Structures are given as C-alpha cells and as structure tokens.
Amino acid sequence: MMWAATFFDGEEWRDGTLVEHDGRMLVRDEPPAPGLPRLDGAVIGGFTDHHVHLQLVDASLLDGSRLGRVVDLGANPAVLRSYVGDGRFDSLRSLNDREDPRSLSEERSDETKRPFPTTSDRGHDARFDSLRSLNDRESPRSLSEERSDETKRPFHTTTAHGRFDSLRSLNDREAARSDERKRPFRTSTVVEYAGAFLTPVGGYPSDRSWAPAGSVREIATTADAASAVAEMADAGAPCIKVASNSTAGPVFDDDLFRMIVELAGRRGLPVVAHAEGAGEAQRAARLGATALAHTPFTEHLTDEEIAEQAASVSWISTLAIHGDPERTTAIDNARRFVAAGGTLHYGTDMGNGPSPVDLNAAELSALREAGLDGIPLLRALAPADPRDPASLLLLLSRETSDPFDARPLKV
Ligand SMILES: [Zn+2]
C-alpha cells in the first residue's frame, strides 16, 4: 500500500511517498505517483528532549511516547551504559542491514517508580550531542531489549545509545549481558548520555539528595579533569556536562573551566554547562561552553549579552521547571535570544520534579510564550528524519497542528 504524504525533513515540510512494507511504514523521498491516495495528516519523526535525567524517572515509559531521542545530562554513566550492552550488540549486527547503528535496549518494568524527591532545584546540566547531531544526524537508532527479573536496577530504563559504542562494545558485550535474563524489549527511542556532572569539590550537585550515586565527579586538578573527561568519552558520551552553579557551592575558576573545555575538545566533545548564579551564563559562554543546559534564569540578560550568547552558544530551553520570578526571567531571555538568531533546543530537565516521560505540554507552551511556534518550534524539537527507516514515525492531523497532538503512525 502506498500514499502520497507530506513529511517534515527536520527543516521543512516536503512531499513524498509513504509505503507499507513488512508491517512497517516507511517514508520515501520520492514524488508521489499520480493518482496515489493522500494520507490524511502529515508525518514527522519522533521528537528530541535535549535534557533529561533517566535515573530520576521511569524510563520504560519512553516506549510509546512521542520522543524519538533523549539526551541524559547527568547520570551515573556505568548505570546507563549497563543498559546499553545488548543494544550495542544489536547495533553491530544491524550494521549489515542498515547504515545506521541501531540499538536495542532493554527495559524492565514492574516495580518501578523509584522514589525521587521532587525537588525543584533547577538545574542540571546540559548536553550537547544533540546539538551536534542536529547537523549530521545520522540518527543512531535503537531497539532495546530488556532484561528483567532479578536485577535490581534502581529503575528501568530504555537506553539505547547506539552511537559511538556500537563497535567498541563488541568485546564487552558478553560481559554486559551476562547474568541476568532478559526479555526482549524494543524501543525506538534513542538514548544518549553525557555521563556524570563535572563539578569542583563540594560543587553543585554533589550535595543534592536527588543526585544518583556515581553521577558527580568532583574535580580539583587538571589530572582529575583529564580522568573524568576520558571516562565519559570512553563511555560514549557525546558531550561533557559541567556544573557552574555559584548559588550552591564553588564553581571552577576560569583556568580549570577552560582546561575542561580543551580536554573535551581533544575528544571531539562539546561542553554543556549548567550555568546558574550572577554572571555564570556569560562566563560559561566566554570560557568555551558550546551550550547551556538551561535558558539563563538567574538574571535578565542585557540585549548586548543576549547577542553574545546567540553568537557563541546554544541553549536548551527548560523553561517550565521554574516558578516565578525565574520563569518570567527565563522566558524573556529566551524570547530575545531567539529574536537575536540564537539556537534554542527543546529540553525539559525531565526528572526535575514530576515530569511526563513524553512530550511536555508545559514546556511547549512556554516555548510559544518565548516566540517559537510553527516550523521554528518543530526545529527546536529536532524530530528524527522520517526517511531513516529506523525513525519513530508520528502522525499529525495536519502540518500546522500542535506537536503535542502527534501520535505514533500505525500501519
Ligand atoms: Zn538537568
């Protein structure tokens, strides 16, 4: 069965052909043949949440959500990576049938619901690969399988993260899958993670009750920094998360911050900074961060500062985590940042307080208040390229409809 269909290629709406093949729907970038029936609605790839914390939510809920990709900006990398083992294996295997590494991840379910203090301490990290991969999105794909039973993982997650690790992990795969018995589980959500927060000794969020064990690396020296960056890079992180919150403890001095940026750069990784406290957003941008994990909310930036931000870093929105007055401040900064040509990515800080493990209506609403709607809003959501057969496909009732109304496209 084939249909003429409008689809979003990541930048614009285009006309193509939707094909049902082996029980799946595929988008082909081919002009529809004359006379084909037209799909009622428009096709868009799964959306990206550029700032999540999977250890603080029930990540199994990603399945069936409208999220095609999530970027974890602060977690114990060993925990996230443990979920990736099988996925990496599948990634390799699937190299044969497709060009993109895919992954399978697994998930478990049952118990779930880990207690998490819904603290609303704003801020965590940021990340970046999303940003980077916006450009070359060869969208890593993932399937995941999950294991279950015994294990006792503190929570379930669906990590896929095919990307960098795909090949590397061939060797450890046996080890990774070892013991537990898993039951097959598939998710189409790609999971990427920055790994731990890098922060000074005693720095944010090292003292926070919500910070999972192993999710913070306290850095005192250049050697510490080199070790932490190497650890995250080896774990497959697409970016390095640096905390720079002067309201909650010490922050890196300029030299050490720059050194982390340089060390990360040697591994090809951008730095995403949690900048909080007077002047921290400007300082992080000046010292070489590539992205801010949060729209600046501590202070109203001047127009000149906004222009500098727009020219040097991208922002991840996270507007809806705040109450006033920070919310108003953040939205005003975001509005002027976007108007100045800045790149604002959709991100919710999922896990910071009660969070839907899906698209977040409150964040979408706040982005509209900041002036993003229509195609610019869709771009901020970084939907997967629906021409990639691995992409989660969503159906909108029409091109101009609310992304929140998107639903998985069924055969
Ligand atoms: Zn965060």
Image: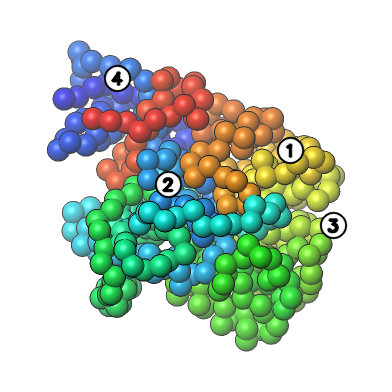
Name the spot of residue 247 as percent of width and height, x first: 81, 62
From mark 3 to mark 2, how far is it between C-alphas? 37 Å
Taking the spot 28% from the left edge, 53% from the top edge, the residue there is 185
Residue 239 vs residue 83: left or right?
Answer: right
Mark 3 element type: loop
Taking the spot 64% from the left edge, 56% from the top edge, the residue there is 117
Amino acid carrying mark 2 in the image: Leu
Task: Say which residue label 3 marks.
Answer: 278
Q: Residues within 10 Å of mark 2 (few under 14, many from 20)?
A: some
Task: Say which residue label 1 marks.
Answer: 331
Residue 63 vs residue 184: left or right?
Answer: right
Mark 2 element type: helix
Name the spot of residue 404 as percent of width and height, x first: 50, 30
Amino acid carrying mark 3 in the image: Ala
Q: Are marks 3 and 2 in contact (CB under 8 Å)?
A: no
Q: Residues within 10 Å of mark 1 (few under 14, many from 20)?
A: many
